[in-house]
Image (cartoon, rainbow, N blue to C red):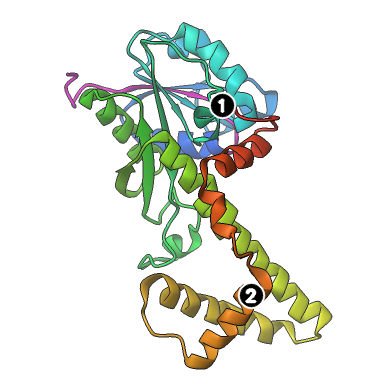
Amino acid sequence: MKPTTETLRIAVIGAGGKMGTRVSNNLAKTDYAVAYVENSPAGRQRVRDAGRSLSETSEAVADADIVVLAVPDLALAAVSAQIVPQLPSGSIVLTLDPAAAYAGLLAVRDDVIQAVAHPCHPSVFLERTTKEEWADTFGGIAAPQDAIAAIESDDADKKRIVEETVRAIYAPVIDVHWVTIKQLAQLEPTLVETVACMIGALLNEALDEAINTMGIPEAAARSILYGHTQVALANGLRGDNPFSDACLIAMDYGRERIIKDDWKKIFRDDELDANLARMLHLDHIER
């Protein structure tokens, strides 16, 4: 097993993109040997503007312990097909979203290990104590967050390398939770995008309706919605205080009017496949 004191060699592919920049900003704070790769002219300029040197793909991955593919889902098939054949035996390919890995779109080699990680983002219940923590709603800057990871290997050393990398790119990290790639896909997108993010967008649509259709003063509508959203999450997710009897009746009315009776089918395998196929612009996901 590689000693934990040995410098980890990390290559970031897509280092000048939106997620690649976040990843690179955090890795630049570590003692790891990091190589930054970016193809687009605008992205290459962002890497230079950040004071980082660019590497060519072949030299960056030649001796990498782990390669972070910080590129959009739709580009992962082509990028992995280019990268994976160049990797040293025993290296790790880390993608930052489970969709392509679950759909079988990534190039694979028997001697290259596939891993996936995704940030949880700072919890709505996180105890924030500084302005920087309050401002960091996404995570990776000041507010602590958890992360979810999956790896297709039983090698403890490889798992350690993935965890070290995950803790670095999403820092500050509280816990890294380990799941399978399929379970990570069930969490992201089904639980958090299909459900939670959709509800967040629905709340904004309801707010817009109250303000622009019903004519309620915007400040009043925002104040009551923001406050009651906190109460709804605290009561619904943690049971902090019981909802009133009248509120329970109104909640039942809302469920009847808005939610389909069979909505939980989105957690079925065929629904997950359909969801990811749509996200990846595929006709279907082959198994």
First of labels 1, 2 by sequence position: 1
Secondary structure beneath dot 2 equals helix
**Residue 72 in view (yes/no):** no
Who is closer to the viewer here, 102 or 80?
102
Please state the total of marks drawn on the protein image: 2
* Identity of the residue drawn at 73% across and 82% down: 218
Determine whether 128 is above or below 172 in the image. below
- Name which quarter of the figure residue 61 lies in: top left
Residue 275 falls in which quadrant of the image? Answer: top right
Residue kind at label 1, given as amino acid type: Gly
- Say the numbered circle drawn on residue 120: none
Q: Where is residue 39 drawn, in percent x and y? A: 63, 20
- Amino acid of disc 2: Glu
Query: Is residue 17 covered in magenta?
Result: yes
In front here: 144 or 41? Answer: 144
Q: Residue 256: which numbered mark, if any?
A: 2
In x, y percent, where is residue 29? 37, 37
For the stretch drawn in magenta, the main secondary structure is: loop
Task: Judge left or right: residue 6 versus residue 259.
Answer: left
Closest to the camera, between mark 1 and mark 2, is 2
Q: Which residues are magenta?
A: 1-18
Quadrant location of the C terminus in the rendered image: top right
Contact? badges 1 and 2 (CB < 8 Å) = no
| Residue 97 image position (x, y, % from top left) | 51, 36
In depth, the one of 55 and 76 nearer the eye is 76
The residue that disc 1 covers is 14
Residue 147, horizontal then vertical, whole percent:
38, 45
